[in-house]
Image (cartoon, rainbow, N blue to C red):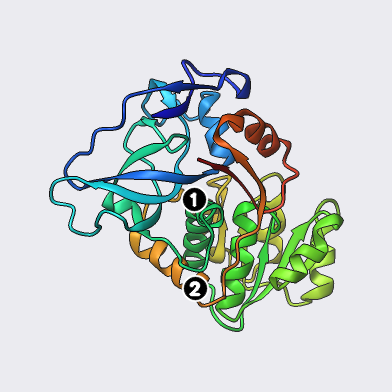
Amino acid sequence: MKAIVLDKYGSADDLHLVDLPDPKVAPGEVLIRVKAAGVNPVDWKLAAGYLDPIMYTDFPLIPGWDVAGVVERVGPDSPEFAVGDEVYGYVRKDWVQYGTYAEFVSANVRMLAKKPTSLSWEQAAGVPLAGLTAYRSIRRAGVTEGDTVLIHAASGGVGSFGVRIAAALGARVIGTASERNHDFLRSLGAEPVTYGEGLADRVRALAPGGVDAALDFAGGDAMEVSLSLVRRPQRVVSITTDAAEKHGGHYVWVRPDPADLAALASLADEGKLTVHVDRALPLAEAAEAWRLSASGRTRGKIVLTV
């Protein structure tokens, strides 16, 4: 199979396309013919060695954790899927080596769900990591109908999912973004505010009594601002820092969950969850996809087509 690999920790410049043997398919796994693979900031951060203290990594390394494709082969004792099923998933294995930037990837059934029928391959591949992160964060914050929720970095990959999921639950969403993304946020169902100095005052102008929950998908001073605005600090969630835990809040590191993937698929097929694909590039242009991701200026998702 063709695959994008790194031979050592490095950057986009070190990615190259090679021929590798097709993956083995263990009990409880299926082999997926990849149609599209999602690109996430964690992909290039992992490649730079940032996660080495907490995750085992072997080389040559195929990056990528998000996938949408067709089941090509079923391993022993894997009755959940059949050959020909269209699936999508968050293929984060116990060690990092055999990822989704390839023509084929093997995945445990606990990492997969049926692909949303309403989404294209590219859209479906953009959902798993970012969608699951947003979904898990919203659940940890206890967001429900009638809540006012502040979402930092609301126009990004995770944030844009957070806006749609919270809105689908009946929450009022205030989202931070640069001014060029304000119309985009309005189209998702959020009330936009510009991030930066004076953010707390701008949020209070929209919600004088503060907010019920806050989701930090941005980092920087988002945690401090969130704590100053939220009524109960236990309803602050961050994916960038564990500082929220000191105040009774939550730090989220997403994990594969087939039930949550199925829930996201249902939201998509009900028309409550849309996926904005900013760029779709061929597999061979993975390096350019990483450069775009690292620029921090993308709106929605970047994906690779296979």
Q: Residue at x 62, y 40 (%)?
A: 281
From the viewer's perspective, is 146 left or right of 54?
A: right
Instruction: Work out whether 141 lies above or below 276.
Output: below
Residue 129: mark in rendering: 1
Considering only order in the chain, which callout, 2 or 1, is on the residue closer to the N terminus?
1
Q: CA distance from mark 1 to mark 2?
A: 18 Å
Nearer to the camera, 268 or 151? 268
Q: Quadrant of residue 14?
A: top right
Instruction: Work out whether 75 lies above or below 191.
Output: above
Instruction: Work out whether 265 lies above or below 304.
Output: below
Q: Residue at x 45, y 65 (%)?
A: 116
From the viewer's perspective, is 121 left or right of 96?
A: right
From the viewer's perspective, is 10 left or right of 29?
A: right
The percent position of residue 96, horizontal first and vertical second, equals: 38, 31
Q: Are marks 1 and 2 in contact (CB under 8 Å)?
A: no
Nearer to the camera, 254 or 260? 260
Residue 269: mark in rendering: 2
The percent position of residue 93, horizontal first and vertical second, equals: 34, 39
Q: Secondary structure at mark 2?
A: helix
Residue 53 in view here: no
Q: Quadrant of the N terminus?
A: top left
From the viewer's perspective, is 251 left or right of 91?
A: right
User: At label 1, which amino acid type do we have?
Assistant: Leu
For disc 1, the neighbor class at 10 Å (few under 14, some 14 to 19, many from 20) is many
Q: Quadrant of residue 289?
A: top right
Q: Residue at x 53, y 46 (%)?
A: 242
User: At label 2, which amino acid type do we have?
Assistant: Asp
